[in-house]
Image (tube, helix red, strand yellow):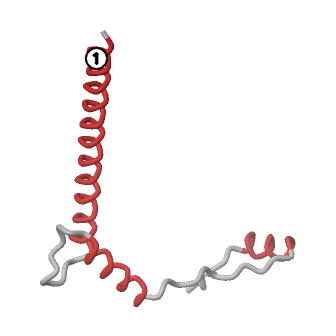
Amino acid sequence: MRVQRCVSPVHAVMGVIEGKVHKAPPKTDGADVLMYLERLQNLVPMCPKDRPVTKLELIQSVIDYIYDLEDALVSSDDEDEDLTSSEEEMECVESS
């Protein structure tokens, strides 16, 4: 049976040659992740608040909410353009 090394010899040597010691990336604390997921659940209006939701269900709710916000912005921009063009038409009529 052969033992596998976690770090390849090439990377180990390169680390020594460069004079740098590479630390392992910090692990994300599970409590922090759960806190942010709960916060997301409270921020998204379409997400059920009365029951626990799966991570996948929460992510899907967030995606749907983002699409709804984009649609609202687009329709708001369309209304603003319509108002601007009608105001310009009114100015042209008044000036003639």
**In the rendered image, the vertical position of residue 63 relative to residue 81, given as above or below:** below
Residue visible at 27% across and 64% down in the picture: 62
**Residue kind at label 1, given as amino acid type:** Glu
Which residue carries the number 1 mark?
94
Quarter of the picture containing the N terminus is: bottom right
Residue at the far bottom: name it.
31
Residue visible at 75% across and 69% down in the picture: 10
Residue 47 horizontal/vertical position (percent)? 18, 71
- Classify 10 Å Cα crowding around label 1: few (below 14), some (14-19), many (20 and above): few
State which quadrant residue 81 falls in: top left
**In the rendered image, the vertical position of residue 93 relative to residue 76, given as above or below:** above
State which quadrant residue 9 falls in: bottom right
Residue 51 horizontal/vertical position (percent)? 13, 84
**In the rendered image, the vertical position of residue 39 relative to residue 29, given as above or below:** above
Residue 52 horizontal/vertical position (percent)? 18, 83
State which quadrant residue 15 falls in: bottom right
Quarter of the picture containing the C terminus is: top left
Residue visible at 73% across and 71% down in the picture: 11
Residue at the far left: name it.
50
Residue 74 horizontal/vertical position (percent)? 28, 41
Residue 18 left/right relative to 56: right
* Viewer-nearest residue: 75 or 24: 75
